[in-house]
Image: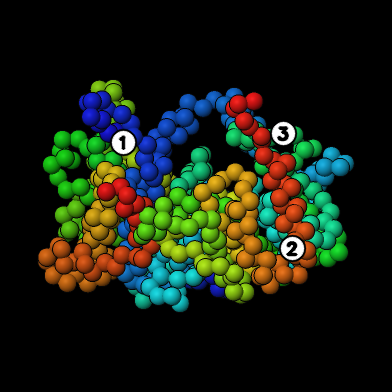
Amino acid sequence: MAATFFGEVVKAPCRAGTEDQEEEEEGRRETAEDREVRRQLARKREVRLFRRQTKTSLEVSLLEKYPCSKFIIAIGNNAVAFLSSFVMNSGAWEEVGCAKLWNEWCRTTDTTHLSPAKSFCMFYHLKSNPSVFGSCPKKNMQVIILTCRHVTDYKTSESTSSLHSPFLKALKTQNFKEPPCCPLLEQPNIVHDLPAAVLSYCQVWKIPAVLYLCYTDVMKLDLITVEAFRPILSSRSLKGLVKNIPQSTEILKKLMTTNEIQSNIYT
Amino acid sequence: MFVPCGDSVPDLAGHTLLMPAVSVGNVGQLAIDLIISTLNMRKIGYFYTDCLVPMVGNNPYATAEENSTELCINAEVYSLPSKKLVALQLRSIFIKYKSKPFCEKLLSWVKSSNCAKVIVLSSSHSYHRNDLQLRSTPFRYLLTPIVQKSVQNRIQSLNWEEMEKSPCIPEIDDSEFCIRIPGGGITKTLYDEGCSKEIPVVVLLKFVSEGDNIPDALGLVEYLNEWLQIIKPCCDDPTASALQWKMPSSWRLLFGSGLPPALF
């Protein structure tokens, strides 16, 4: 509880997230119907893998069907744009599956017209070298994750307004022995959500993995932010995969223009 | 589930497990950070779970360039074999409806590891105190029946206050009395499960309000230290004893980045 200047007492949210009493009371009032609704919601939120072309679900784990030595994950529109333009446009990549997911925050359901700006998840593998998997962790596998965060999330003793964004930082698991192509993320900065979940898994199960995190002040699709990922093209993991950089730059520019919504309030 | 860092599962039989409850002011977690950092405890494994929000970062207890690049996740286990101490640190909040399953998994691991006892460091909303509590020390303890025999005497000699029962439903006059720990997160669940499953659980908590809770964390570790004597108290001066606890390097910038000079 906190009192405001006007003398009213309001319930302030607890930083430690302890709405425990509410959960306890909910548990006591819960009927069989509530439990069934909760179960159905949980089933709806399950992530399902399927093949887009045949619309059939993938019963066997993707990594069992397509075992690989490199697993590259791009999260967010700028990271996906970078991966599509620079890595996936070198060599022929074949779509092997996609993940269908839903939760109360989802807005995209259309699977046919995808662009880096929409939220979805596709899996591709490199036809010429099936051991590379873009978009289960087995032995001898390396995981590379690309994502973006807003620069205000970055903690530093200087003011964030003095930082020159976008800039790249890395986090790697113990078993990732290659030197990263940018400075490591300093304490006390942390990462949450999907990149953190993947990296945690890899750290616990001793899989070599690296996260390249781009801090930017533009969260929508932006050329300068995508270009900030360039240093990773010189890494040992990606060097062999990227062939034609000038062509990739052209593809990236095209991606940008198709995604821009031309808005002019005067027309 | 517990996943060891190395190839073998460490033997935790007879060890005391210290753990935080994610509670108001994050006092328990800050206290565990102080303990791990001061005693230079070594990481022995991960408590890998889907019940906590995922998070990663570099070693929060780094003291030099060499040890600053070890990746840390949201739930890790540290140990100090010389004092038979094990510490579990939780670094993120529970996902909705997952706190009870987490408690069950945790307590089943405690049982299977044959830990001597579990000490839960926690906190509770200070605004929920009654008149008597407002006038007394802000520290409280709770013991599950099975651990009472072995620690009761020592605790009594310290003149500690046991957590009082309060009306289960405050609005009703003749409501039954029970233990309530508002803002304590999983503390009550751990205590209740400890009672019913005969697990030796000791709860140490402080009444706090949210804000800069570092002094509260220092207070809580000093309270624990009165009993366990994990570091030797140097003298009776409270300010000097607080200096014995080493704050981890990750406590920098707790209240955000530097300020823009243009603000002034």
Q: Which residue is mark 2?
A: A245
Q: Which residue is mark 1?
A: B178
Q: Chain of mark 2?
A: A
Instruction: Kindly indicate whether the residues beneath marks 3 and 2 are on one polypeptide chain.
Output: yes
Instruction: Check residue A109 in the rendering and tell me which mark sits there, or answer none.
Output: 3
From the viewer's perspective, tell me whether residue A184 is left or right of residue A134.
left
| Residue B192 in the image, given as x and y percentages of width and height | 39, 44
Q: How is the image coloured?
A: rainbow
| Residue B140 in the image, given as x and y percentages of width and height | 24, 49
From the viewer's perspective, tell me whether residue A109 is left or right of residue B151.
right
Q: Does dot 1 land on a helix, a strand or a loop? A: strand
Q: Disc 1 residue type?
A: Cys
Crowd around label 1: few <14 · some 14–19 · many ≥20 (10 Å): few
Distance from the alpha carbon under mark 2 to that under mark 1: 69 Å
Viewer-proximal residue among B179 and A104:
A104
Q: Residue at x 53, y 52 (%)?
A: A216
The residue mark sitting in front, 3 or 2, is 2
Crowd around label 3: few <14 · some 14–19 · many ≥20 (10 Å): few
Q: Disc 3 residue type?
A: Thr
The residue mark sitting in front, 1 or 3, is 3
Q: Disc 2 residue type?
A: Ile
Q: Residue at x 18, y 40 (%)?
A: B133
